[in-house]
Amino acid sequence: MKNSLLAVSIISALSLNTFAISAYAAQHEHDHITVSYQGKDATSHTAEANKATAKTLNFADTRAFEQSSKQLVAKLDEKTAKILRAEFKFIGEEAPDTVNPSLYRQAKLNMVADGLYKVRDGIYQVRGTDLSNLTLIRSDSGWIAYDVLLTKEAAKASLEFAMKNLPQGGDLPVVAMIYSHSHADHFGGARGVQELYPNVKVYGSDNITKEIVDENVLAGNAMSRRAAYQYGATLGQHDHGIVDAALGKGLSKGEITYVRPDYTLNSESKWETLTIDGLEMIFMDASGTEAASEMITYIPSMKALWSAELTYQGMHNIYTLRGAKVRDAQKWSKDINEMINAFGGEVETLFAAHSAPVWGNKEINDFLKLQRDNYGLVHNQTLRLANQGVTIQDIGDAIQDVIPESIFKAWHTNGYHGTYSHNAKAVYNMYLGYFDMNPANLNPLPTHPESIKFVQYMGGADKVLANAEADFAQGDYRFVATALNKVVMADPTNSKARELLADTYEQLGYQSEGAGWRNIYLTGAQELRVGIQPGTPKTASADVISEMDMPTLFDFLAVKIDSLKAAKQGLVTMNVITPDDNRILYVEMSNGNLSNIEVATPKDSDANLTINKADVNRILMGEIKLTELLANGSAKLTGDKDAFSKISSSLVEFNTDFEIVPLNPNQASEHKH
């Protein structure tokens, strides 16, 4: 029994409490914040900076507001509005001093989304219940649901609301469900749709299941902690905290789910034409742009183009701050160009997973060309500057000096989600890596001893603090943040430095146009003042995790191996045999590393575990334990049962609330890891 329990410990470790999808759950799958946190007011310098920014903005251009309010069929009822919108009732007409006026304008724009909207005859959208839109497209015998929100609860409520208010066809079923790409706010509500319409057929972009379960699993714990910063998980919604999520107001609360597609598109070519319930649809693969698996769709009979998440009312991330592989800005630009070339001559409606539609052939083409040129500009100008010797640290500022007025004046190219600064650094890193070739940056000291040396060289903490106070008083916040971070890193107990650094981060947050930048700065300020608060994303949906294949599960286990402990165990081998899918995984722990490979027949090994993959899924779903499967004969463990012990004793548990800004030792002792 002891060895069986050790086997359970390994399998239990596979139901990881960190997963890429949990990044989207950062605002709602956490304990309640334990302190009342409101933050401080804007300084006069921040207020003046935001007023100066406002003078550069083209507030006379209100087209996005007109598009967002156009063709409202029914406003959200009180029950449906409670899913999300109630948290943002504080958004007013004038931007407060604590919010960048461009970001506040985006916050107001996303507040317009408030119900069921007609896109055109046969296409409707529910907006304002989640980060993304729920789209319904009329087919011969019912409706096609395109992208189904983040959570089961939001999707179900939004769909029920839509069916009650559709001008016609509300009594017809949803016959098909399509996922445009592999991000959770586009498939997470799948079970909600399926529960209402059990016979729904599911379609997804090429390789979507693998990308969903693989993306960032290996770095999931770090990503989850970082996601709490990017999404402001502990800040609350108010003028000193979260005001918007760039792509929409925010994230719905509930369970992220996934129904594996019955059919994946574009698996053999970039273009595929398919008739779904009598409706002809043309699909173009756009994987490697905004998502690792993504596609856009054109409906010829409606002259309607679905751009998935390649476009929205703002600039997207080339690198997402929570952590992800860098996206290809050049391919992104080229794929938008493909859309223009293929459909630009006749398209009359452009609709997407975020923001409101764009109508009219000329306006659509103008919109798409600016989006295309903005991503192309980030790619091309970053490399032009890099080829002239501009370094990765300087590239974010340098690119902002080369933005043409036509792009600068257009609202939908602004950096609410992605920014020119971190997107340019992402392009630089994609081609040239993190190192700028300055020898001083090749092998610097680790952060803590480096900070101690910096403070010593600068004449001590008191001198740095005096200079920082003077610069803060002048509104020179960026370098104050750099200098005081060294002081607090060197001595986390320096309360005066901590407080001034928190004040500095806060003002930088208030001035930030990007929603993620704002949340990161404000969360850093919060943790300096009151320590780490509950809010780091916890377990992702087991419904999604169960779709991981065995090699990916053991790849994640390999990341949890302590190499020095494992090296002491010597060579350990085993076969994991899953008869129901006729696969065999050979696992080997050697030289402090855990590797795995699929094989045709079992190899000589220390132990063999025979278990159906379906039963592994049941374990991950919490429906059964391995001990039960072994006891009833559904699973079999043979050979050296100590092999499991050797592997399990080499595993570590990740700290989900690891330190980002230096914790005060008193806070650290109070904080439960």
Image: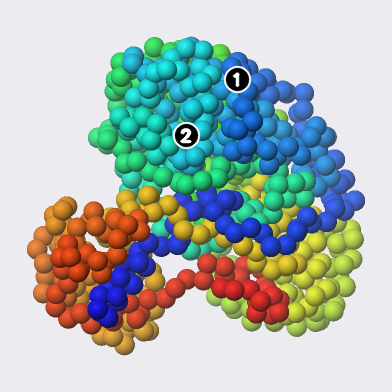
Q: Residue at x 11, y 60 (%)?
A: 600
Dot 2 falls on a residue whose secondary structure is helix
Q: Position of residue 338 (x, y in %)?
A: 42, 27
> Sequence-wise, which precedes: disc 2 or disc 1?
1
Q: Do residues under tags 2 and 1 come within 8 Å of each other at their CB atoms?
A: no
Q: Residue at x 29, y 65 (%)?
A: 625
The image quadrant of residue 204 is top left
Does residue 86 appear in the picture of this structure? yes
Q: Quadrant of the C terminus?
A: bottom right
Left or right of 454 on screen, residue 154: left
Residue closer to the observer: 328 or 394 = 328
Residue under label 2: 156
The image quadrant of residue 118 is top right
Checking the image for residue 664, the label placed there is none
Q: Label 1 amino acid?
A: Ala
Q: Quadrant of the N terminus?
A: bottom left
Q: Residue at x 80, y 72 (%)?
A: 497
Q: Position of residue 367 (x, y in %)?
A: 58, 24
Residue under label 1: 74
Q: Position of residue 456 (x, y in %)?
A: 75, 83
Residue closer to the observer: 484 or 8 = 8
Dot 1 falls on a residue whose secondary structure is strand
Does residue 489 appear in the picture of this structure? no
Left or right of 527 on screen, residue 186: left
Q: CA distance from mark 2 to mark 1?
A: 17 Å
Left or right of 650 on screen, residue 382: right
Q: Label 2 amino acid?
A: Lys
As displayed, is residue 462 above or below residue 163? below
